[in-house]
Image: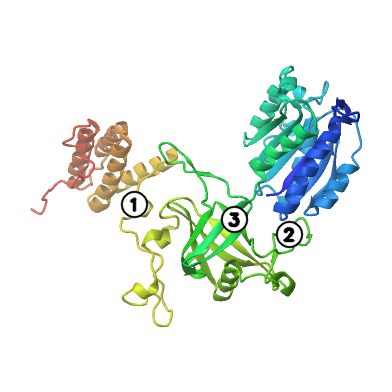
Amino acid sequence: MPTVVLMDVSLSMTRPVCLDGSEEFQRKNLAVHGLNMLFEHMASNYRLEFTALMAFSSLWELLVPFTRDYNALQEALSRLEDYDKTCVESALNGVNNVVQQEWGSACPCQLVLVTDGSLGIGKGSLRHSLQTLKQRGEDKKFPLPFPFPTKLFIMCVANAEELQATDAMDNLEELLRLSGGDGQIFTVDGPLCMKSVQGMFGRLIDFAYSPFHAVLHCGNLSSDVQVFPRPEPVVVDDEVEPMPQTVSTDLEIVGFLEIADISSPPVISRHLVLPIAVNKDVDEVGAGATDELEEEPSASQMAGKSPNFCVLLHGSLKVEGMVALVQLGPEWFGMLYAQADSKKKSNLMMSLFEPGPEPLPWLGKISHLGPISEAAENPYGEDDSKSPFPVTPQAKRSYAQNVTVWIKASGLQTDVQKILRNARKLPDKTQTFYKELNRLRKAALAFGFWELLKGVAELLERECTLLPDSAHPDAAFQLTHAAQQLKLASTGDSQYAAFDHNIVPMHTDFSS
């Protein structure tokens, strides 16, 4: 998940801060100190994170494009210059352009906005932007929400009392709400100083940039791993009281499957799994590249280190062309697999399925899967000529049944016209007429559409009066009978409006 750091370099950031010592600092100096702390943490714990640095006042500038070189980011911070007034809207438009050019609109992004809480003055200020939200045309829309998923973290080099003395906090909270609300506003606790700013950025690190360490188990083997990026809690929508489910720090491999059996399953997120015991050096690569690791650690890297199960698993899955099913929590599963980006580079990846006992319908319930050795016969056949998947469901799926659905008026009109066409060809089309009539009757009863039944009955009575003299006498009897049955069903009487009841043709005999 790439990060954009948006640094306020307006004149208000140059306001002096009197510390206990004789040295005087600007708010910009405190912000730079906090960002250096963040970059040092990411260099140690989030080395695979792509980060860009932007500065803004009335205009915006991309100082460092997306990179993993945190030295370059820190050097750019040391060369910041001071400019004019604050214009947050212009800066957000710049973030939108930079992120979409590099990552498109599908990649989630974290935005760290560092400011002193000053909203700017006049046109272009955050206050003016928010007041004119509903007075804009399509060509001048406010940039939030971004077209890509965003987490907005606002770092205010000011304490809460200072922000609440004006409407700054209210406007910043509105900005956070417009971004989607998935983020947080951080303020300084106590007086402005190096220590309080360090504490504020420390809270950001704990909230958004703390590494996710876990233990990967497989039988008697285990390995300490880091999952990158950190898995987000997942809320199951169909629960009565939705509770966020989090990935356990104990990841248990429950079995292995061939890639052909699992195919390309729907997943909610993908993550890189890094063995902690093997320190792999990650070289600086282009901003658009995927996260890559060396396929095998070099001899110098392995020197003096014990064998690592994670490295063994990675190589085995790659060679055998298989995936490992891993349990992430109660009734929550994912898969581990080797993803090769080139002949020399490969990753051990983990994809998370939707929570539930049956995330992939063609596999059935994960808890029902077992080793081939326990099967009465090889489910793949002696020569691997067959597969036990997809599992045949016990209950017939609703979408596999012939269900009548009227989304548009034209669909209902077509069904009624089909009944009338068959009515004009009675008695030759008697069976087809009653089949279509019963299909419409069941749909109308299911929807509670009593007026439809009454309306079609009146149409059938009208058709009966329009029959030509040459028509077979059975046609009039059948139309009258069908119309009468529909009218009885339209009353809602359980005797005639039973859903499973079918209208049968009227028995007639014209043989004599």
Q: Gap in Å between the C-alphas at discs 2 and 1?
A: 48 Å
Compare residues 74 and 443 and report the one nearer the observer: 74
Coordinates of residue 348 in the picture (x, y in percent): 61, 64
Can residue 266 be seen at all in this image of the molecule?
no
User: Looking at the picture, which amino acid does disc 3 mark?
Assistant: Arg
Mark 2 / mark 1, whichever is N-terminal = 2
Label 1: state its secondary structure. Answer: loop
Can residue 448 be seen at all in this image of the molecule?
yes
Q: Which circle marks residue 93 in the picture?
A: none
Compare residues 114 and 343 and report the one nearer the observer: 114
Q: Categorize mark 1 by other alpha carbons within 10 Å: few (<14), some (14-19), many (20+).
A: few
Coordinates of residue 369 in the picture (x, y in percent): 39, 64
Query: Can you identify the residue that label 1 sits on?
Result: 402
Residue 467, picture quadrant: top left
Q: Nearer the viewer, mark 2 or mark 1?
A: 2
Query: Can you identify the residue that label 2 sits on?
Result: 289
Query: Can you identify the residue that label 3 sits on?
Result: 270
Q: Determine whether, in the image, residue 482 is placed left or right of residue 98.
A: left
Q: Determine whether, in the image, residue 19 is placed left or right of residue 250.
A: right
Q: Gap in Å between the C-alphas at discs 3 and 2?
A: 16 Å
Q: Outermost residue, top direction?
A: 165
Q: Outermost residue, front direction?
A: 21
Mark 1 / mark 3, whichever is N-terminal = 3
Label 2: state its secondary structure. Answer: loop
Q: Tell me if residue 429 comes above or below residue 26 in the rendering.
A: below
User: Looking at the picture, which amino acid does disc 1 mark?
Assistant: Asn
Q: Tell me if residue 462 comes above or below residue 135 in the rendering.
A: below
Mark 3 / mark 2, whichever is N-terminal = 3
Q: Tell me if residue 358 comes above or below residue 469 in the rendering.
A: below
Residue 477, picture quadrant: top left
